[in-house]
Image (cartoon, rainbow, N blue to C red):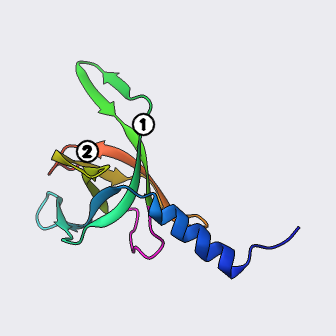
Amino acid sequence: MNAITATEVSRLRAAIESVMFDICLLGTTTEDTTGTYVTETVTWGTTDIPCGFTPATQSQTYESGEAQANFSEATLRLPLSVSITGFDRVRLTSRFGRPLSPAQEFRIEGAPQPGVGCLILSLAAVTPGGRG
């Protein structure tokens, strides 16, 4: 079996990044534990990041008593050069060149997984500005 050459990896990364038609912003989450409550603050970046968003094919609803919670999962591809952790947030601002209004916000489920040509993130939708 032949190993992939550095040139082939470079071409693969360029090909993957060339089909990232969506735009997102990355948010860094910080928690403040003063007093008895924990407050969470998301500081959003201002640089548009090309990304590849794949929405879930289905959503799940969990019921507990009278409360319902919707969980909508998605997958996101980011360039390998992006620095992101599983504690950060993602705001999807554009799909296929069309701005989203309102933008969709997601939390990252687990650690970002490095692939050959991109980072792969599992996402769960959250209420904008919410703790979700």
Query: Which quadrant of the rendered structure holds the N terminus?
Result: bottom right
Q: Circle 2 — which element?
A: strand
**Camera sees residue 82:** yes
Residue reaching furthest right?
Answer: 1
Q: Earlier in the sequence, mark 1 or mark 2?
A: 1
- The CA distance from mark 1 to mark 2 is 14 Å
- State the residue in front, 95 or 110: 95
Q: Residue at x 19, y 66 (%)?
A: 44
Asked if residue 117 is among those painted magenta in the image, a careful observer would answer: no
Q: Is residue 113 visible in the rendered structure shown here?
A: no
Classed neighbour count for the residue bearing mark 1: other residues with Cα under 10 Å, few (<14), some (14–19), many (≥20): few
Q: Point out the stretch of residues depicted in magenta.
A: 78-87
The relative height of residue 115 versus residue 106 in the rendered view (above or below) is below
Residue 16 placement (x, y as % from top left): 52, 62
Residue holding disc 1: 56
Total numbered circles: 2
Prevailing secondary structure of the magenta residues = loop
Residue drawn at x 42%, y 36% is 56
Q: Residue 111's spot in the image, x, y percent?
A: 47, 61
* Farthest residue, direction left: 35
Instruction: Give coordinates of residue 127: x percent, y percent.
Output: 19, 43
Select label 1 or label 2 by which is in front.
1
Give, as a three-letter code, the residue at label 2. Answer: Val
Residues 13 and 62: in front is 13
Residue depicted at x 25% and y 52%: 94
Q: Is residue 32 above or below residue 110?
A: below
Q: Which mark is residue 104?
A: none
Which is more toward the observer, 14 or 61?
A: 14
Instruction: Tell me the amino acid under the disc marked 1.
Output: Ala
Q: Which residue is mark 2?
A: 126
Mark 1 lies on a secondary structure that is loop
